[in-house]
Image (cartoon, coloured by chain):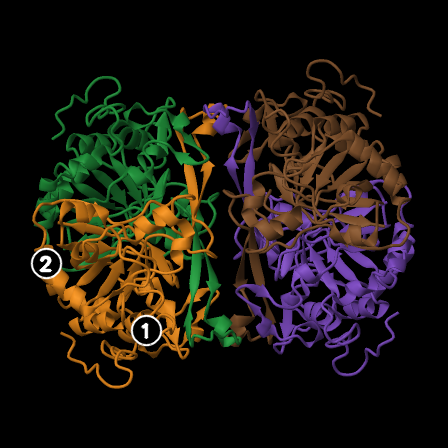
Chain colours: A brown, B purple, C orange, D green
Amino acid sequence: MNDRATDGERPLSELNWGRWGEGDERGAANLLTPEVVKEAVGLVRDGRVFSLALPIGEADAPVLPGRPACQHYMRIDGGDYAAGLSRRTGFQSVDDVVMLPTHGTTHMDALAHIADEHRLFNGFPLSGVRSNGAARLGIDKTPPLVGPGVMLDVCALRGVESLGPGDVITPADIEACEQRQGVRVRPGSIVLFRTGWLSRFASEGVSAFKSEAGIGMAAAQWLAERDVAAVGADNFAVEVIPTESGKAAPVHRALIRGCGIYLMELFNLEELREAGVGEFLFVAAPLRIVGGVGSPLNPIAIT
Amino acid sequence: MNDRATDGERPLSELNWGRWGEGDERGAANLLTPEVVKEAVGLVRDGRVFSLALPIGEADAPVLPGRPACQHYMRIDGGDYAAGLSRRTGFQSVDDVVMLPTHGTTHMDALAHIADEHRLFNGFPLSGVRSNGAARLGIDKTPPLVGPGVMLDVCALRGVESLGPGDVITPADIEACEQRQGVRVRPGSIVLFRTGWLSRFASEGVSAFKSEAGIGMAAAQWLAERDVAAVGADNFAVEVIPTESGKAAPVHRALIRGCGIYLMELFNLEELREAGVGEFLFVAAPLRIVGGVGSPLNPIAIT
Amino acid sequence: MNDRATDGERPLSELNWGRWGEGDERGAANLLTPEVVKEAVGLVRDGRVFSLALPIGEADAPVLPGRPACQHYMRIDGGDYAAGLSRRTGFQSVDDVVMLPTHGTTHMDALAHIADEHRLFNGFPLSGVRSNGAARLGIDKTPPLVGPGVMLDVCALRGVESLGPGDVITPADIEACEQRQGVRVRPGSIVLFRTGWLSRFASEGVSAFKSEAGIGMAAAQWLAERDVAAVGADNFAVEVIPTESGKAAPVHRALIRGCGIYLMELFNLEELREAGVGEFLFVAAPLRIVGGVGSPLNPIAIT
Amino acid sequence: MNDRATDGERPLSELNWGRWGEGDERGAANLLTPEVVKEAVGLVRDGRVFSLALPIGEADAPVLPGRPACQHYMRIDGGDYAAGLSRRTGFQSVDDVVMLPTHGTTHMDALAHIADEHRLFNGFPLSGVRSNGAARLGIDKTPPLVGPGVMLDVCALRGVESLGPGDVITPADIEACEQRQGVRVRPGSIVLFRTGWLSRFASEGVSAFKSEAGIGMAAAQWLAERDVAAVGADNFAVEVIPTESGKAAPVHRALIRGCGIYLMELFNLEELREAGVGEFLFVAAPLRIVGGVGSPLNPIAIT
């Protein structure tokens, strides 16, 4: 449990500031202590490995309108050799480049991603995020997240294929999922919510970015009090849209900026669901982009 | 042990073709069975997590001349807000994109990366690798590599800070490292070689790309017979350059194309070395770039 | 007039092959001789200069679905200075990069853009266009087009704001425009057609890429016989879509590949129209992208 | 002549502010009136056209260290067809993208490129140049430059192949060139200086970016008083480096920011020199990149 007081007027807005030191840039990743890691490793039973990432391709990826598409270009390819390119050395190699919006596919938000009143998590000034990247709280400061993973299947709880736009996930939902699935959110947990949004994107395309089911502020508070390390979902913003208050991105502000808790989006949880997996060793290692404010990700669950 | 015969004229060139089925696109990742994963999980003792990735930044990265630099651009940043941008919503978010040569920082080669006589691993035609990516053996076909990691510190074995250009790592070196470090390369192992090359790059810059210490063909054969899943190193090509025979990239041809064994390059093994770690749970999940022939990577060791 | 025979079964398909030499890579730009340039310069009366380019921006540009958007990123900007960046030198500079699909805004097709039966203009093999660009007929081989420009306002001729999807522009239209506007298409002319398509894009967005008004095969033949150097339009393909025969891109094949005549698309002809200008000195200098198969363009008319 | 007083302590720093109106974003391009254009057109004698642009390719371009290389990627190419791609339609087309640092090849600086005391030309605030580009004075606000061009061959004047690093071009040099070449710098002129720097780059590579011959402050003042529209050169900064005062970029500050005069760099003037051309109709139309602070360019001279 997070023993810090969370009541009062702005309960989460600066909750974990200073908790891990004035200069801390890792936030809730600090909860992933060797003890927590060892405990999480103990969750492995079968030795099965699941990738929770969407494929990255020009046409497939659910990229928020306004962001550029993921792009993939070959610098040299088999076509070149078929067209007559030859190397004296008698063998052939191929090479490529990718251009990725860091939030345009399965990804992790850096702690530098969100500010309020021009302050980032732990009080670092937003003005340190410049054209050459985030001087503080960049994704390169985030260690690989290795810890106890739990997937809460809110769709299964409610008996639907997909939650509806604007549906709020509440603390009662979380606790009902825990009970139904026989799992437990604990300090250091990486909690993944299954909302069914990806199936809506598959059928609706970019118009599915207008609203989504997600966690509300009460759930955010519950998660912060339970002292989780990270929260992910199969939607594009973790939090419900439109928001309950009408204010923009309150969960982002509370969790990322107030608590240093990592948000992760556009996860594919379908294989986990099919396998009936609830708890697992979670591993997600963001690319060490210096000053990056997010990273594409291939998160995995080991069961 | 890999019970397939490896003697004869071209011992490794098609060794594992057909071994996991005609249509197989995972190669030696097939060795990472649930049993192997569980065994590897059993290597965790302390719960410490090490990132083996280099930072990705325009100036830092050792990018082979000819490849473009890693590029990072902000789509919106703190400077914009400092300059007067405001949102009615009262909060601020920032966003970015990255452009990466897939082999220009810590990375994994896809099995589609290397061909010989216009065939890729398992006999797939090179002509399937086109401007829209690799139809077969792309990095999106590679599952996350989760298995038993072993780091062989050849520098420590020889008592040097860095091996010299052209120094060949031999089976005798591997076995001496095993004995000296009390570790063992086993079926499904992910084997990482420490050559000290990164320190040469730090001092010599791009001229350090002309040659390097690395494994020779005998070591490649030894590793294939031991049936490893992947081989990584702190240099740019795993294999020694210039090669022993003068022919180009024989280890790449033998291991990637002949055996379906993954090669991974530009690893930072310094923290592992400082911690005196030899065996660990290795996890590396490449980005799921559709048709990609490589992926930037943040590989981790859990000890 | 082009005195080469154009009748027979495949009248235009190889019409100008060999006309300017076996190794020629300039095609109909050869028609822009010093004499033609001088004549074109003589068209200047008022000294007014018109840009015929669309603005290049992420949201504005009519980019064919499937092509990436035009992207513009700042490497250093005023926000950075507002956020506190300072230089001892007491001044400030800013810098940026652009990423452009070469056919994604106002542009010129290179002669290497179109092949048929695996041959480009003048018989060069398509196989010479590889990942490192076009070995032959790349846009770097195209000289700046400077010559007599004529804008044919087919909308005005028909008394409509915009032609409709599938409307075919015929030789009779061209001749009626010549007469109505008092202009003349001549050898070496750069002919620009006003179809009103941009106004359709403004109202319909990407769905306006499904079809368009444009020139048909008879007009293409007429233009080739008149021996023009280039043909541009305010639509995305110059030619009518769907095509008359149902076969793909017959005008592209005939004019680019058969005749070496340049096609240019997504021109903004509205200011010319408002000014009532029909003939002018036309200047368009493509970027000298080595091996490029097209170039973004800021074409101009001087009247 | 520019009749505005240029004496006093900061003679050029705000010379042309307000001259063409408070909201003006075109600067000295305003000098290119229809009358000036007509006069410039009158310079055409032979009808020959010269491109003054360097080729744009990964290896060729003289890109200032720190800027990314020009990059060119094929989206579909002849290799793909050679490898078996086919279209039912029976023809083939190819497509590509380019990524360009706007100042990394032959280019024009936008008026937004340079600030001093956080003000751009005409007093516009630097803070308007943000991640989405320059709100004011972006290259999209610059009309095509069409006017009287003059090339001053300082190498020929001094009888050298190339001026040396740090060599200052003075008003006396300009006037000697005028006399020797029989040309005249006039109001609205686009003046191009030949320093021979490109030959130094060819032999020295990126180390040639440490210093260069170029115009000094007296020449800048002379040019401003002569009321030119733009100044270009075959070097990377137009002005001499190291600067005479040791302060950074005084000519950029004076001409771009104080006078609204355009600077253009990395011109190839060798063909003009070989042809013995001194005066010509100059045409350079920057790409209309919305908010761009520079543009790659294919400038031309028509003689």
Tell whether A130 sits left or right of D196. Answer: right
Q: CA distance from mark 2 to mark 1?
A: 32 Å
Q: Where residue C257 is drawn, which disc sits there?
A: 1
* Residue A146 seen in render: yes
Secondary element at image label 1: helix
Marks 2, 1 in one chain? yes
Image x and y of residue C63, in percent: 41, 53
Image x and y of residue D187, in percent: 13, 36
Image x and y of residue B145, in percent: 77, 56
The residue at the far top in this view is A8
- Which residue type does callout 2 highlight? Arg
As rendered, which of B50 and D219 lies closer to the eye?
B50
Q: Chain of mark 2?
A: C
Tell whether B132 sits left or right of C226. Answer: right
Q: Is residue A63 above or below residue B116?
A: above
Image x and y of residue D83, in percent: 53, 75
Q: Where residue C155 is drawn, which disc sits there?
A: none
The residue to which callout 2 is attached is C180
Quadrant for residue D34, please give it.
top left
Q: Give me the residue at 32% from left, 74% from top.
A: C121
Quadrant for residue D165, please give it.
top left
Q: Chain of mark 1?
A: C
- Which residue type does callout 1 highlight? Arg
